[in-house]
């Protein structure tokens, strides 16, 4: 990619675009499914879209409060990840979540580690396979689905994921199959000496009348620097139910950008529960399309921005059909110089009569220098609807703090207890008890004063 006109030097943005375009050209033939014409088309649509736009700037309304120039300026390694990760996986084993005998697929630095994975406990009717292997075995299933829910050109990051996607998983549930235990997808990053970029792609397809819960874990090593650029596409057929849980615990130096989009058929249900605890900068885009009558979704989330962390949640619910429901409940906590962003949009289309949509966002500031920006949006183009939204930003209740102090509890412990109570409200919305307590323990660990609180709540 040459300089622009008249021998002028390329800008930083041009150099960044050129770096990714050149890396794609060098790597395209080594990517999974490179021999499939339709998949080459998806990938090239992605890299062409990125070449046209580059990374977003704060002038873009959707990125107004999140400046991704730190990502743009870094020269992340985009080469094929090394396959020699077993030793690294053993070093990181204590960081893996305790999932017991539940089905689990573990990735370390972009490669599946069979030694730590357990996909043999799957009940009949459920299939989980590593992304690259699935393409080789059953590409017809993915043709039309891959990129059919999350368009490659949707954002700069989905474009790059479409171009470079090489790891991840495909989860399929047969009609009428009920899965009582959650399926875990675990991504561990940061053991390489270089600063790597990872592009996991996750596809979940639940056929008619089925039910499944999937948990995505993202775990990082100390303060290592890397980029997780994740895309999750979910298809929920008629009468099916998908519960999706995400636990983001990236390293303190990492960047985590993720897009999740779900498409719901008639009578389908989708529940998203997400917690963002790690990463220097994280962005979570969650979109749900209620495409047929009596579809229902609930979106719950908790985000913590401490130190100099920046975390951004953008949600978008498209009500396209009548008699559908959506419920959103998000809470944010910011301390130090942390910054949180929540933008929740609900779009009720003209034909979506009898819609019920409710959205709540509550935020807690723990320091004078912390900041949270919240923007709830309702766009209603139908007459017969029940819709509401509310957002608050506040501090710890001084009366409750005084009450606890008067009972002999030290101030730091009292503040920690109230903060944990604020967060626990969201944790308790996890429907599966097997997930609720382990995730609650992870949240407690990341809160200010969490070590002391863990002793208190034992």
Image (cartoon, rainbow, N blue to C red):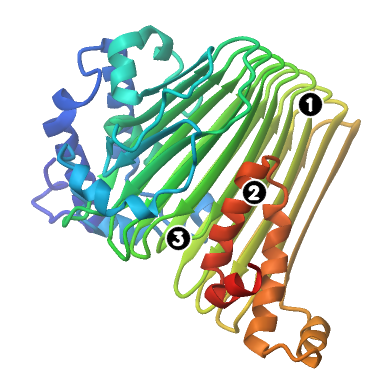
Label 1 element class: loop
Residue 448 is drawn in which quadrant? bottom right
Image quarter where the C terminus lies is bottom right
Mark 1 or mark 2, whichever is nearer to me: 2
**Is 149 situated above or below 216?**
above
Crowding around mark 2 (Cα neighbors within 10 Å: few <14, some 14 to 19, many 20+) is: some
Circles 2 and 3, Cβ within 8 Å, touching? The answer is no
Disc 2 designates what residue?
Answer: 436
Q: Is residue 155 among the parts visible in the rendering?
A: no
In the rendered image, the vertical position of residue 108 relative to residue 366, given as above or below:
above
Q: Is residue 211 visible?
A: yes
**Residue identifier under label 1:** 350
Please report the residue visible at 31 percent of the width from the left and 66 percent of the height from the top. Answer: 223
For the residues bearing labels 1 and 2, Cβ distance under 8 angstroms = no
Q: Residue at the location (44% across, 73% down)?
A: 308
Q: Earlier in the sequence, mark 2 or mark 3?
A: 3
Locate residue 320: give its quadrant.
Answer: top right
**Residue annotated with mark 3:** 278
Give the answer, above or below, for where 10 lies relative to 37.
below
Mark 1–mark 3 contact, CB under 8 Å? no
Q: Quadrant of residue 327?
A: top right
Q: Nearer the viewer, mark 1 or mark 3?
A: 3
């Amino acid at each position: 990619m040459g300089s622009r006109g008249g021998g002028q030097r390329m800008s930083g943005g041009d150099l960044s675009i050129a770096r990714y375009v050149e890396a794609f050209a060098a790597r395209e033939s080594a990517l999974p499914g490179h021999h499939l014409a339709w998949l080459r088309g998806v990938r090239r649509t992605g890299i062409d879209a990125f070449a046209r736009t580059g990374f977003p700037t704060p002038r873009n309304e959707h990125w107004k409060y999140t400046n991704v120039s730190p990502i743009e300026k870094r020269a992340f390694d985009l080469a094929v990840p090394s396959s020699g990760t077993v030793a690294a996986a053993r070093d990181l084993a204590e960081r893996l979540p305790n999932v017991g005998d539940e089905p689990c697929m573990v990735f370390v630095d972009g490669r599946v580690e069979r030694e730590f994975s357990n996909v043999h406990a799957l009940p009949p009717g459920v299939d989980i396979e590593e992304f690259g292997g699935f393409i080789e075995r059953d590409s017809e299933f993915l043709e039309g689905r891959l990129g059919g829910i999350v368009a490659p050109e949707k954002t700069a990051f989905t474009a790059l994921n479409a171009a470079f996607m090489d790891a991840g998983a495909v989860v399929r549930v047969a009609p009428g199959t009920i899965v009582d235990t959650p399926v875990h997808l675990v991504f561990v990053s940061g053991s390489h000496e270089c600063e790597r970029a990872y592009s996991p792609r996750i596809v979940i397809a639940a056929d008619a009348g089925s039910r499944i819960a999937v948990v995505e874990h993202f775990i990082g090593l100390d303060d290592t620097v890397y980029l997780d650029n994740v895309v999750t596409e979910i298809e929920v057929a008629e009468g099916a139910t998908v519960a999706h849980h995400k636990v983001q615990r990236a390293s303190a130096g990492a960047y985590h950008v993720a897009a999740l989009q779900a498409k719901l058929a008639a009578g389908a249900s989708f529940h998203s529960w997400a917690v963002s605890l790690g990463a220097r900068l994280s962005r979570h885009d969650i979109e749900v399309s209620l495409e047929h009558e009596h579809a229902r979704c609930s979106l719950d989330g908790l985000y913590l921005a401490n130190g100099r962390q920046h975390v951004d949640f953008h949600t978008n619910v498209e009500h396209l059909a009548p008699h559908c429901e959506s419920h959103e409940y998000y809470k944010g906590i910011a301390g130090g110089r942390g910054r949180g962003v929540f933008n929740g949009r609900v779009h009720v289309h003209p034909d979506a009569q009898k819609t019920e949509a409710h959205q709540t966002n509550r935020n807690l500031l723990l320091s004078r220098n912390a900041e949270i920006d919240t923007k709830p949006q309702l766009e209603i183009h139908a007459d017969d609807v029940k819709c509401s939204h509310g957002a608050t930003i506040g501090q710890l209740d001084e009366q409750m703090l005084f009450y606890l102090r008067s009972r002999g509890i030290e101030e730091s412990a009292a503040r920690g207890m109230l903060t944990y109570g604020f967060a626990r409200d969201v944790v308790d919305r996890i429907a599966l008890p097997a997930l609720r307590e382990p995730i609650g323990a992870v949240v407690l660990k990341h809160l200010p004063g969490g070590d002391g609180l863990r002793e208190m709540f034992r």
